[in-house]
Amino acid sequence: MIGWALRQLVIWGGVALLLFAVGHRLAAPPGAPEPAPAASTPTPEEARGAVSNSLVFHADPQGHVVLEASVNGAPVKFLVDTGATTVTLTLRDAAAAGLSGSDLVFSQRTMTANGVGRVAPVRLRELRIDQLVVDDVAAAVDEHLSISLLGQSFLTRLDGYEMRNGVLTLSYW
Protein backbone atom coordinates (compact mmCIF):
# COMPACT_ATOMS: atom_id res chain seq x y z
CA MET A 1 0.00 0.00 0.00
CA ILE A 2 2.82 2.42 0.83
CA GLY A 3 4.55 1.55 -2.48
CA TRP A 4 1.38 2.37 -4.39
CA ALA A 5 1.03 5.70 -2.58
CA LEU A 6 4.65 6.67 -3.29
CA ARG A 7 4.29 5.75 -6.95
CA GLN A 8 1.13 7.88 -7.22
CA LEU A 9 2.90 10.77 -5.48
CA VAL A 10 5.80 10.64 -7.94
CA ILE A 11 3.49 10.40 -10.97
CA TRP A 12 1.23 13.28 -9.89
CA GLY A 13 4.22 15.35 -8.78
CA GLY A 14 5.75 14.94 -12.25
CA VAL A 15 2.46 15.92 -13.93
CA ALA A 16 2.20 19.02 -11.71
CA LEU A 17 5.78 20.02 -12.50
CA LEU A 18 5.18 19.58 -16.23
CA LEU A 19 1.98 21.67 -16.09
CA PHE A 20 3.78 24.38 -14.11
CA ALA A 21 6.61 24.53 -16.67
CA VAL A 22 4.22 24.67 -19.64
CA GLY A 23 2.01 27.28 -17.95
CA HIS A 24 5.01 29.41 -17.05
CA ARG A 25 6.25 29.32 -20.67
CA LEU A 26 2.77 30.20 -22.01
CA ALA A 27 2.44 33.08 -19.54
CA ALA A 28 5.44 34.91 -21.00
CA PRO A 29 4.32 37.90 -23.09
CA PRO A 30 4.64 37.50 -26.88
CA GLY A 31 7.98 38.67 -28.18
CA ALA A 32 9.63 38.40 -24.78
CA PRO A 33 13.21 37.20 -25.05
CA GLU A 34 13.90 33.58 -24.22
CA PRO A 35 15.84 33.08 -21.02
CA ALA A 36 19.52 32.58 -21.70
CA PRO A 37 20.68 28.99 -21.37
CA ALA A 38 22.94 28.23 -18.46
CA ALA A 39 26.56 28.88 -19.31
CA SER A 40 28.69 25.78 -19.53
CA THR A 41 32.11 25.61 -18.02
CA PRO A 42 34.63 26.45 -20.73
CA THR A 43 37.28 23.93 -21.65
CA PRO A 44 40.89 24.93 -20.99
CA GLU A 45 41.31 25.69 -24.70
CA GLU A 46 38.23 27.95 -24.71
CA ALA A 47 39.42 29.67 -21.57
CA ARG A 48 42.72 30.45 -23.28
CA GLY A 49 40.86 31.69 -26.36
CA ALA A 50 42.45 29.06 -28.59
CA VAL A 51 40.81 28.38 -31.92
CA SER A 52 40.81 24.90 -33.39
CA ASN A 53 42.16 24.47 -36.90
CA SER A 54 40.87 21.82 -39.22
CA LEU A 55 41.55 20.17 -42.54
CA VAL A 56 38.78 18.60 -44.58
CA PHE A 57 39.11 15.74 -47.07
CA HIS A 58 36.45 14.02 -49.16
CA ALA A 59 36.24 10.28 -49.67
CA ASP A 60 36.48 8.79 -53.14
CA PRO A 61 33.52 6.84 -54.60
CA GLN A 62 34.69 3.69 -52.76
CA GLY A 63 34.59 5.56 -49.43
CA HIS A 64 38.39 5.82 -49.06
CA VAL A 65 40.17 9.02 -48.11
CA VAL A 66 43.49 9.41 -49.90
CA LEU A 67 45.55 12.50 -49.17
CA GLU A 68 48.89 14.02 -50.05
CA ALA A 69 51.35 14.62 -47.23
CA SER A 70 55.09 14.81 -46.70
CA VAL A 71 57.29 12.64 -44.51
CA ASN A 72 60.65 14.12 -43.59
CA GLY A 73 60.14 16.50 -46.53
CA ALA A 74 59.33 13.80 -49.12
CA PRO A 75 55.89 13.68 -50.77
CA VAL A 76 53.79 10.66 -49.76
CA LYS A 77 50.29 9.60 -50.77
CA PHE A 78 48.42 8.17 -47.77
CA LEU A 79 45.26 6.11 -47.44
CA VAL A 80 43.63 7.15 -44.14
CA ASP A 81 43.16 3.94 -42.13
CA THR A 82 41.61 4.48 -38.71
CA GLY A 83 41.99 0.75 -38.06
CA ALA A 84 45.77 0.84 -38.51
CA THR A 85 47.68 1.09 -35.24
CA THR A 86 50.59 2.98 -36.76
CA VAL A 87 51.48 5.06 -39.75
CA THR A 88 52.84 2.51 -42.21
CA LEU A 89 55.00 3.36 -45.20
CA THR A 90 55.69 1.49 -48.40
CA LEU A 91 59.32 0.63 -49.13
CA ARG A 92 59.36 3.30 -51.86
CA ASP A 93 57.92 6.04 -49.61
CA ALA A 94 60.29 5.10 -46.79
CA ALA A 95 63.29 5.36 -49.13
CA ALA A 96 62.09 8.77 -50.38
CA ALA A 97 61.82 9.91 -46.73
CA GLY A 98 65.42 8.83 -46.07
CA LEU A 99 64.59 5.55 -44.32
CA SER A 100 66.29 2.62 -45.98
CA GLY A 101 69.13 0.15 -45.67
CA SER A 102 70.29 -0.26 -42.08
CA ASP A 103 67.40 1.92 -40.82
CA LEU A 104 65.02 -0.91 -41.68
CA VAL A 105 65.07 -4.01 -39.50
CA PHE A 106 62.01 -6.14 -40.24
CA SER A 107 61.75 -7.45 -36.71
CA GLN A 108 58.00 -7.32 -36.10
CA ARG A 109 55.04 -9.21 -37.48
CA THR A 110 51.74 -7.54 -38.16
CA MET A 111 48.24 -8.73 -39.01
CA THR A 112 46.71 -6.93 -41.96
CA ALA A 113 43.67 -7.39 -44.17
CA ASN A 114 46.00 -9.28 -46.54
CA GLY A 115 47.31 -11.60 -43.82
CA VAL A 116 50.45 -11.66 -41.68
CA GLY A 117 53.34 -9.45 -42.77
CA ARG A 118 56.70 -8.20 -41.53
CA VAL A 119 57.36 -4.58 -40.66
CA ALA A 120 60.33 -2.50 -39.63
CA PRO A 121 59.55 -0.05 -36.81
CA VAL A 122 60.81 3.51 -37.46
CA ARG A 123 60.31 7.06 -36.18
CA LEU A 124 59.37 9.84 -38.57
CA ARG A 125 61.05 13.16 -37.87
CA GLU A 126 58.07 15.02 -39.34
CA LEU A 127 54.74 14.23 -40.94
CA ARG A 128 53.11 17.24 -42.61
CA ILE A 129 49.66 17.62 -44.15
CA ASP A 130 49.25 21.15 -45.51
CA GLN A 131 49.96 23.46 -42.53
CA LEU A 132 49.52 20.65 -39.95
CA VAL A 133 52.88 19.33 -38.71
CA VAL A 134 53.38 16.48 -36.23
CA ASP A 135 56.93 15.68 -35.13
CA ASP A 136 58.42 12.38 -33.96
CA VAL A 137 55.72 10.00 -35.19
CA ALA A 138 55.93 6.26 -34.48
CA ALA A 139 55.66 4.36 -37.76
CA ALA A 140 56.56 1.19 -39.57
CA VAL A 141 57.68 0.16 -43.03
CA ASP A 142 55.87 -2.79 -44.61
CA GLU A 143 57.60 -5.01 -47.18
CA HIS A 144 54.51 -5.61 -49.30
CA LEU A 145 52.32 -2.54 -48.89
CA SER A 146 51.12 -0.86 -52.10
CA ILE A 147 50.07 2.49 -50.54
CA SER A 148 51.17 4.10 -47.29
CA LEU A 149 48.64 4.14 -44.43
CA LEU A 150 47.89 7.07 -42.15
CA GLY A 151 47.07 5.30 -38.89
CA GLN A 152 46.46 5.92 -35.22
CA SER A 153 50.04 6.86 -34.28
CA PHE A 154 49.35 10.08 -36.21
CA LEU A 155 45.59 10.47 -35.75
CA THR A 156 45.70 10.23 -31.95
CA ARG A 157 48.20 13.10 -31.85
CA LEU A 158 45.51 15.44 -33.20
CA ASP A 159 42.83 17.21 -31.20
CA GLY A 160 40.36 14.95 -32.98
CA TYR A 161 39.16 13.50 -36.25
CA GLU A 162 35.74 12.66 -37.59
CA MET A 163 34.43 10.81 -40.62
CA ARG A 164 30.85 11.77 -41.44
CA ASN A 165 28.94 11.46 -44.71
CA GLY A 166 32.09 10.85 -46.72
CA VAL A 167 33.96 13.81 -45.25
CA LEU A 168 37.02 13.43 -43.02
CA THR A 169 37.80 16.36 -40.73
CA LEU A 170 41.14 16.52 -38.91
CA SER A 171 41.11 18.99 -36.00
CA TYR A 172 44.23 20.31 -34.33
CA TRP A 173 45.41 23.23 -32.19
Image (spheres, rainbow, N blue to C red):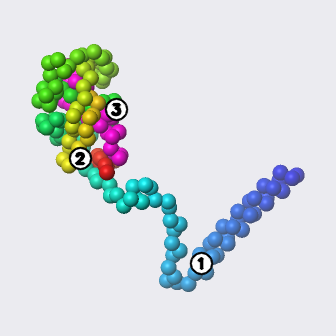
Distance between mark 2 and mark 3 Cα atoms: 21 Å
Give the image location of residue 65, x and y in percent: 24, 40
Looking at marks 2 and 1 on the same chain, the residue that comes earlier in the sequence is marked by 1
In this figure, which residue is indicated by the disc labeled 2? 132
Q: Residue at coordinates 67% horizontally, 72% vertically from top-left?
A: 20
Q: Is 17 on the left-hand or right-hand side of 173?
A: right
Which of the 4 image quadrants contains residue 112? top left
Callout 3: SS:
loop
Callout 2: SS:
strand
Callout 1: SS:
helix
Query: In front: 48, or 63?
Result: 48
Looking at marks 3 and 1 on the same chain, the residue that comes earlier in the sequence is marked by 1
Looking at marks 2 and 3 on the same chain, the residue that comes earlier in the sequence is marked by 3
Distance between mark 2 and mark 1 Cα atoms: 51 Å
- Cβ atoms under marks 2 and 1 closer than 8 Å: no
User: What range of the chain is rendered magenta?
Assistant: 140-161
Residue 142: within the magenta? yes
In this figure, which residue is indicated by the disc labeled 3? 83
In this figure, which residue is indicated by the disc labeled 1? 26
Report crowding for label 3: few under 14, some 14 to 19, many 20 or more residues within 10 A (C-alpha): few
